[in-house]
Image (tube, grey):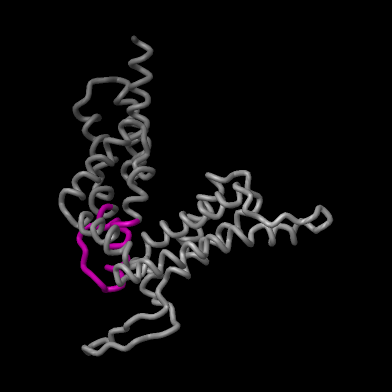
Amino acid sequence: MLLVVIFSWEVSTRFFRDRTEHMTDVLFGLAAFFISIPWNFQYAIPNTKRTINVLNYIDIQYLGTQGVFAAILISGCAVWLYNKLMQRNFTIKLPDSVPPAVAQSFSSLIPGSITFGVFIILIGLSTACTGKTMPALFLSILQAPALAISKTNAFAFVSQFTWGLLQWFGIHPTSIWGAIFGMTWTINDTQNMLGQAHHIFSTLFMNFSTIAAGAFSLSPVLTILIASKRVAARKITKVALLPAIFNISEPITFGLPIVLNQFTSFHL
């Protein structure tokens, strides 16, 4: 639910900046998400092989890690569709004498109804054609393969290798890998903490192995101090040594490439 609120707000404020009521878009994103969540499901009784049919209650598994992709896709599409309908003037026009607050509620009536209708139709088609609701369909098509890839050694190697490489070029790796980790390794963390799984590769694994081991901070500082003969590089590492001891890598991973690039440009 938190992802729905945040993503709806981000889509609204970033792509529809002329809107004055961004919270209305958030509410439509939340409503579309709740329309798509299954309200009838089978519940497996723990420690038994029995299942019972639960009617008229939300399947709360999609309010957790299994609903990440559904939360992002459904809320983003709902906000986009609603705003596009508003821009095409699918609205009820009231006289100027009507107070703005009242007119605003009526202007969103038709776009909102169409948005909800689209998701009702989509959830009906998804259930009729695949036997799965939209969150379950997203989970099987998108989230499950992504989680499977994130558990491999290749994914871990590529993510950790490119992390330092991106910093070398002055690009903060969190802006690239943050969203990917949020839908893969962060889910692994949550499942580990809930006792649902025992994933090796996760965000905590990266923090307490690659980063905490000093691969991005202390190691390059010590290497340059011991082996480098370049005066500019050694001056930077002397400044970065103390932060590196406490795993603060920005002075070396960002400072060194930037200063060296400026130094080279100056001499050229």
Query: In the rendering, at what x and y percent does residue 214 appear?
Result: 26, 45
Query: In the rendering, at what x and y percent does residue 124 appear?
Result: 40, 69
Q: Is residue 81 above or below residue 254?
A: below
Q: Is residue 71 above or below residue 255?
A: below
Query: In the rendering, at what x and y percent does residue 37 appear?
Result: 42, 71
**Relative depth, front residue between 84 and 168:** 84
Name the outermost residue toward the top.
268
Q: Is residue 51 left or right of residue 13?
A: left
Is residue 80 within the magenta segment? Answer: no
Is residue 192 within the magenta segment? Answer: yes
Q: Residue at x 72, y 54 (%)?
A: 93
Question: In which quadrant of the rendered image does the C terminus lie?
Answer: top left
Q: Is residue 144 left or right of residue 249?
A: left
All told, the count of numbered labels is 0
Name the outermost residue toward the left.
153
Q: Residue at x 24, y 35 (%)?
A: 222
Quarter of image, res 128: bottom left
Query: In the rendering, at what x and y percent does residue 41 appear?
Result: 35, 80
Q: Is residue 264 above or below residue 156?
A: above
Q: Residue at x 80, y 58 (%)?
A: 99
Q: Is residue 145 above or below residue 234?
A: below
**Relative depth, front residue between 242 and 265:** 265
Task: Write down the region rendered in magenta.
Answer: 183-206
